Amino acid sequence: MIRSLLVANRGEIARRIFRTARRMGVSTIAIYSDADAQAPHAREADRAVRVGPAAAAESYLNMEAVLAAAREAGAEAIHPGYGFLSENAAFAEAVTAAGLVWVGPPPAAIRAMGLKDAAKALMAEAGVPVTPGYLGEDQSAARLAAEAERIGFPVLIKAVAGGGGKGMRKVDRAADFAEALGAAQREAKAAFGDDRVLLETYVTRPRHIEVQVFGDSHGQVVHLFERDCSLQRRHQKVIEEAPAPGMTEAVRQAVCAAAVRAAQAVDYVGAGTVEFIADASEGLRADRIWFMEMNTRLQVEHPVTEAVTGQDLVEWQLRVAAGEPLPLTQDEITLSGWAMEARLYAENPATGFLPSTGELEHFVLPGGVRIDSGVEAGGVVSPHYDPMIAKLIARGESREAAAAALAAACAQVEVWPVRTNAGFLARCLAEPDFLAGEVDTSFIGERLEALATPPAPSQTALAAAALGRLAGEEPSPSDPNSPWRALTGFRLNAAPAQTVRLYRDGEAVEAPIPQDGLGADVLLAQDGQIVVFEAGEAYAFEAVAPQALGGEGASGDGAITSPMPGKVVAVSVEAGQSVSRGQTLVTLEAMKMEHALAAPFDGVVETLSVAAGDQVSEGLVMVRLAPAA
């Protein structure tokens, strides 16, 4: 067995791998950038080694620095986690060339599956059904546009070297193809160093079904059943579950057998995921499920498979990397119950899901479910890395039980002043169509406004804010004896003795003072700000009018500011140009994604202070609009 393990990653996946390694008696080694010097994963390891500055390209993606850290710490093996260098065949080769154990698939398998076009061709030869499309070498804009016309709209543009939804765009009309292609190529180049794309026919009611596979160095390959990852936003997974709703045993056998064939075709060793797209317009049918890609690593959503199979996939990885055979045969792997995972992101759904960064002054996650998190209270969400701050995983004997447990957990999340998508997740899980299993990848997009918009604070939340205003001192939410956690039994029909005037988003709110207590949690912040947590949302109130604080309030003055530090990748307007409400003005790249900043009203570009390639700081005014005459 491996004796010492360096995890070439950060955050929740590093902590999760360390957890299994410690249980198995394996010494743990962390790497960290300057931004992560005090991060939990660096503190928890038996040893931690610095690998460079905050920028991922100079630290976690610096192969030489990671290998030097392994040598310095005396590591015997390297586990790449997911993301960063996990699917880099050159890094896998460098690890083995340095005499270290690579906890991952052979470099040849990574290369075979790393380019989507070559992988699809290989799968077709192996008898695995693939999605119709264009996989050609000619990457000229004219040829790609012609192929899109041949395939027929809507068409899907996908980065050849990509994953995680980066470099992917759905195009509904020929007129939109050139702009979408440019955006996909820029994003692919920034994320993977390769701007090549392929085209696929767009499935009208797509379901994202993936199969967990595992191989060993003795020629055995098994599957650990399927997961459904159809609940997505902009091709980024939001909620995953196992097994897939509506999956019959016959279809399960067909898709899992195809996944095993895919792994066998590349002599696969270790953990991998074979991803399929299913046309769910007539339910799940074996003849309407096609291969999309193979992820040659452990997946973010692996905990749901662990929950329904009772297996520790990281332990399997370490044993297979040490040369042991798979712990179980196919017949010994069983499926029991249901599990769901929600990805808690530092982002604000109400502002178009823009990432939120800063210190986690208040950070409380629920009990009763599995939590895999990379941060703690008092820590910092950095703009340099992915905005996922935790995964919440619930298991139940039925799908309904798992969904109810996960929804309740998301509703109990309390984070401030960093914003999260907890309330959005809770609303997704409570949607009647989701509970009925009527899910495809367009589910969120079709309901985006309702799901992303927080409801107005309830009377209970307003009452909590009123009590917070009257308290005159900061309550202690972490104290189990705090009256702020003990107040319960608020009666909506009871007449309040009086009200307190507060301000929310610049508007006056009359908050009733309850007579019998309440059920919401309240945090009284500094400078007269009161924050109430309810159903996963954080509602901020001011004790005095914004004008009295000297603030501008919601001025709507046409200043388009950078919501976070980042790089300007495209400027779509010129000074003096007339624009319409919702029109993209500037595209900013930050936290590994592109963010389009749009005009808030019809107007004219008065000033333009940035150009493509500029690095901008948070709050910089990039464009200023004047209202249309």
Image (cartoon, rainbow, N blue to C red):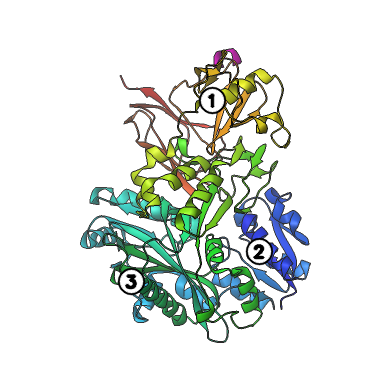
At x 49%, y 54%, the residue is 401
Q: Tell me, yes or no, whether the two marked residues, 3 and 2, touch with CB atoms within 8 Å.
A: no
Whether 548 is among the magenta residues is yes
Residue 360 in sight in this render: no
Residue placed under numbered mark 1 in the picture: 491
At x 50%, y 28%, the residue is 457
Of label 1 and label 2, which has the lower sequence position? 2
Find the magenta span and give its range.
545-549
Residue 597 in sight in this render: yes
The 10 Å Cα crowd at callout 1, few under 14, some 14 to 19, many 20 or more, is some
Q: Amino acid at mark 1?
A: Arg
The 10 Å Cα crowd at callout 2, few under 14, some 14 to 19, many 20 or more, is many
> What's the mark number on residue 370?
none
For numbered disc 2, what is the local secondary structure?
helix
Q: Amino acid at mark 3?
A: Val
| Disc 3 versus disc 2: nearer the observer | 2
Of label 3 and label 1, which has the lower sequence position? 3
Residue placed under numbered mark 3 in the picture: 130
Whether 217 is among the magenta residues is no
At x 65%, y 77%, the residue is 319
Residue 283 image position (x, y, % from top left): 30, 62
Decide if residue 582 is on the left or right side of residue 355: left
Asked if 514 appears above or below 392 in the picture, the reply is above
Of label 3 and label 2, which has the lower sequence position? 2
Residue 412 image position (x, y, % from top left): 58, 41
For numbered disc 3, what is the local secondary structure?
loop
For numbered disc 1, what is the local secondary structure?
loop
